[in-house]
Image: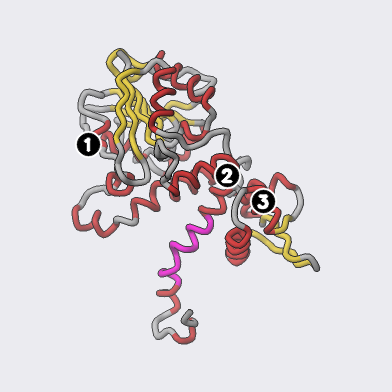
Amino acid sequence: MVSTEDLDYPQIILQYSNGFLVSKVMFTACELGVFDLLLESGEPLSSDAIAARLGTSTTGMERLLDACVGLKLLAADLTQEGALYRNTEISNTYLTKSSPKSQYHIMMYYSNTVYLCWHYLADAVREGRNQYERAFGVSSKDVFGAMYRQICDLGGGGGALARECVSLYPNSTVTIYDLPKVVQMAKEQFIPPEERRIAFHEGDFFNDSIPEAELYILSKILHDWDDDKCRQLLAKVHKSCKPGGGVLLVESLLNEDKSGPLETQLYSMNMLVQTEGKERTAAAYSKLLEAGGFREVQVKRTGKLYDAVLGRKS
């Protein structure tokens, strides 16, 4: 590797070049649950212990932890047995899910949505349009359709899909339904105040009522939950859905023969260590939709990271 002394350009260029590496280290540590584990443990842990509890490779985790130490997101205490890692104050305050000042959800939004879209920045500049379809393989025109005027994005987070809907369909209104702290963050940081066609609804969609709509979007939601919770949620959605409406699932689909895709299988392992859920096949999602009351299930394979499954209410 070339040392910085051998480079004949200013240090600031190197800093800019490595910027995305820094952010992805932080995003990955958040996604894997490193900061949450260290907070919950109440004591420093070795890289082997962290890797075992989070279901990762030991070599990969050690390198990730050391990078976080370099970024001052973690501190390392050296012992005769090796390094023991602990959160710094900034990580406890801003990168753990349970903190009142947590920025975890925005980190995940940047990692899972913004980061992928920015890969196509040159295309966006050339064409003057957003790159959501290139990044995720899901075309809003294909899955939303002009027949849907009232759309509810359950767990809509920063509103990426909501903004996509209103930009393509001038007659549509979108309600972002999410937890109060997520809604507040979206209002302050992501949704322009002048965008009147995006509304907000604060609540817990398992325990609170779901507003009436023609189309419900569940983007990367069901993979967080077990089958019983998914059936429960879809039944609530079906009850609130207007006749002729439907529900759109945006998920990374496993092949029916268990042959992959490898990235989706790895995501499913991540669900195992972090959530109650798992990645599923198209058939499994179709079965859940039908159990919730939806019919005429259509599956759109995109050939990219995320696919679309649409169920309709008769």
The residue indicated by pointer 1 is: 168
The residue indicated by pointer 3 is: 52
Say which amino acid is labelled 3: Ala
Looking at the image, residue 265 sits to the left or right of residue 132; the answer is right
Residue furthest out toward the right: 80
Q: Quadrant of residue 309?
A: top left
- Which one is closest to the eye, mark 2 or mark 1? 1
Q: Give the range drawn in magenta.
A: 15-26
Closer to the camera in the image, 147 or 196: 147
Q: Is mark 1 on a helix, strand or loop?
A: helix
Can you give x and y, in whole percent of width and height, for residue 5 in the image?
49, 86
**Circles 1 and 3 in contact, beta carbons < 8 Å:** no
Can you give x and y, in whole percent of width and height, for residue 79 in the image?
79, 66
Looking at the image, residue 161 sits to the left or right of residue 103; the answer is left
Closer to the camera in the image, 82 or 92: 82
Mark carried by residue 205: none
Can you give x and y, in whole percent of width and height, for residue 77 in the image?
74, 64
Can you give x and y, in whole percent of width and height, for residue 29 in the image?
56, 53
Q: In which quarter of the image is residue 219?
A: top left
The residue indicated by pointer 2 is: 102
Looking at the image, residue 80 sits to the left or right of residue 163; the answer is right
Q: Which colour scheme is used?
A: secondary structure
Say which amino acid is labelled 1: Leu
